[in-house]
Image: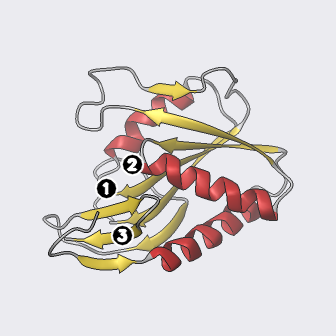
Amino acid sequence: MTYPQQNLILDKAQIQQKIIRMAYEIYEQNFDEQELILAGVYPNGYVMAEMLAQKLDSIADIKLDLLQVKLDKTAPLQSPIQLSPDTFSLSGRVIILVDDVLNTGKTLAYTLNTFLQQNPKKVEVATLVNRHHTLYPIASTYTGYSLATTLRERVDVVLEEDEVAAYLH
C-alpha cells in the first residue's frame, strides 16, 4: 500500500537497521535478565515486537515471550485492554512495551495501568518513531528514529509483507 503525497522517512533497510540497533540496546540494558516480555501494541507494535524478538533471539541467550496488546486507541476506556496470550504471569518480569509511533503517549499511558496492576519488575518502552508531542508522562526507552514534526503532520508506519516503510504526511 503506497500512500500518495507522503515523504518516505524510513525504507525497509533503514527500519531493519533501527530494529537491530534497538535489539542490541535492549540486550545491553537487560543482559542480566533471564527472560523478557515483548508486549506489542496491535497491529504494528506487535509486528515490531516480533521483529525485535527475532533479532534478540539471534544475539542473546534470554528467554523471550511475545504478548499482544489490543485496545481501542481512540477510546481506551470504553473497552478493556486485551493481552494475549493471557496465560502467563507478568509479576516480577521485565516488560518491553513496543509500538510503532510515539506521538502523544496516550496509547502507552493507558496500557501501563494494565501492566502495573500485575507488579512487573520493570516496564520499558520501545518505539520505532518518536515524534516528541507527548501529552502524557511517557518517554521512549529505546527509539529507532527521533523526528521533530508539526502537530498537523502524521507518521504512518507500514509493516506488511510486501512493504516495510515509514512515511510523513
Type of the residue with mark 2: Pro
- Which residue carries the number 2 mark? 137
Q: Quadrant of the N terminus?
A: bottom left
Viewport quadrant of the C terminus? bottom left
Q: Amino acid at mark 1?
A: Thr
Question: How far is disc 3 from disc 2 in space, using C-alphas?
Answer: 25 Å
Q: Dot 3, crowdedness within 10 Å: few (<14), some or many (≥20)? A: many
Location of residue 52 with respect to 39 vertically, above or below: below
Q: Amino acid at mark 3?
A: Ala
- Above or below 138: residue 142: below
Which residue is disc 3 drawn over?
166
* Viewer-nearest residue: 167 or 94: 167
What SS does tag 1 mark?
loop
Q: Is residue 3 left or right of residue 103?
A: left
Q: In which quadrant of the rendered view does residue 67 lie?
A: top right
Q: CA distance from mark 3 to mark 1?
A: 20 Å
User: Farthest residue in the front direction?
Assistant: 162
* Disc assigned to residue 134: 1
